[in-house]
Image (cartoon, rainbow, N blue to C red):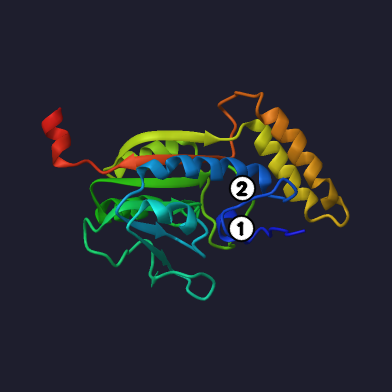
């Protein structure tokens, strides 16, 4: 069984796929579904910020003209450009789309990162971002934050972007089931229960609508353009 350790975030583990027998299935199934739906906002030149091994390149690649990954750690990832995400080495208004998946929690100044994203986006360009409300410690010691929807709304607003949508990924059942899988995967012999947990809690998840507890969020935001002011 492919086990996921606490110092390995879900988006860097492998290419974008998942299976109900795996320990991170409950989180990844909703993440992947929402990323696929968000491809309608991808176009032109895309920058993958904190790209890791670029597991979503094959998802977004057909929708854009070019796909460029930037990451500060070329020894453990496959970036096209090795650079600090707080100091992106690109001119203003360079990209039509920015993708940032499960990166924001690892940045000591998330507000600064989003202002950099806004700077390199062209007017009218889109940011597609995901960030956790729950996940165990990983990439230690560079694991700084978890986010509520209100924290994400504030960060988007102060970066100068316009929030188009924010979607919670999973319910309390997803959160509880995923936390249980994290416990089981590190107990000898108990990891065999993971498929059962995935099926059972996945079933309950589809029947729960409590908005207070979730595991993750997907955000889509847009950089305002001069045409926006004219239309207003």
Instruction: Look at 13% across and 40% down and name the residue there.
Output: 226
Q: Are marks 2 and 1 in contact (CB under 8 Å)?
A: yes
Name above or below for residue 56 compared with residue 29: below
Q: Residues within 10 Å of mark 2 (few under 14, many from 20)?
A: some
Q: Residues within 10 Å of mark 1 (few under 14, many from 20)?
A: some
- Between the residue at mark 2 and the residue at mark 1, the CA separation in whole angstroms equals 8 Å
Q: In the orientation shown, which residue stands out farthest toward the bottom?
A: 75
Q: Position of residue 36 (x, y in %)?
A: 49, 44
Residue under label 2, please give it.
135
Name above or below for residue 137 compared with residue 79: above
**Circle number at residue 110:** none
Residue under label 1, please give it.
138
Q: Position of residue 157 (x, y in %)?
A: 31, 39
Q: In the orientation shown, which residue stands out farthest toward the front?
A: 62
Instruction: Look at 56% across and 26% down and name the residue there.
Output: 211
Q: In the orientation shown, which residue stands out farthest toward the right?
A: 189
């Amino acid at each position: 069984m492919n086990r996921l350790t606490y110092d390995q975030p879900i988006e860097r583990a492998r290419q974008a796929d998942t299976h109900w027998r795996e320990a991170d299935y409950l989180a990844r199934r909703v993440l992947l579904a929402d990323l696929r739906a968000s491809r309608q906002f991808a176009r032109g030149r895309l920058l993958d910020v904190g790209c890791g091994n670029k597991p979503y390149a094959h998802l977004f690649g057909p929708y854009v003209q070019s796909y460029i990954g930037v990451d500060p750690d070329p020894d453990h990832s496959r970036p096209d450009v090795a650079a600090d995400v707080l100091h992106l080495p690109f001119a203003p208004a360079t990209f039509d789309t920015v993708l940032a998946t499960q990166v924001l929690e690892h940045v000591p100044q998330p507000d600064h990162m989003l202002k950099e994203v806004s700077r390199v986006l062209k007017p009218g360009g889109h940011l597609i971002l995901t960030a956790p409300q729950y996940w165990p410690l990983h990439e230690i010691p560079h694991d700084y934050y978890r986010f509520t929807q209100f924290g994400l709304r504030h960060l988007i607003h102060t970066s100068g972007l316009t929030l188009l949508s924010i979607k919670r990924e999973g319910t309390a059942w997803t959160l509880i089931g995923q936390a249980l899988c994290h416990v089981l995967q590190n107990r000898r012999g108990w990891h065999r229960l993971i498929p059962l947990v995935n099926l059972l809690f996945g079933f309950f998840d589809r029947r729960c609508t409590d908005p207070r507890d979730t595991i993750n969020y997907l955000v889509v935001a847009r950089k305002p353009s001069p045409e926006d002011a004219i239309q207003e």
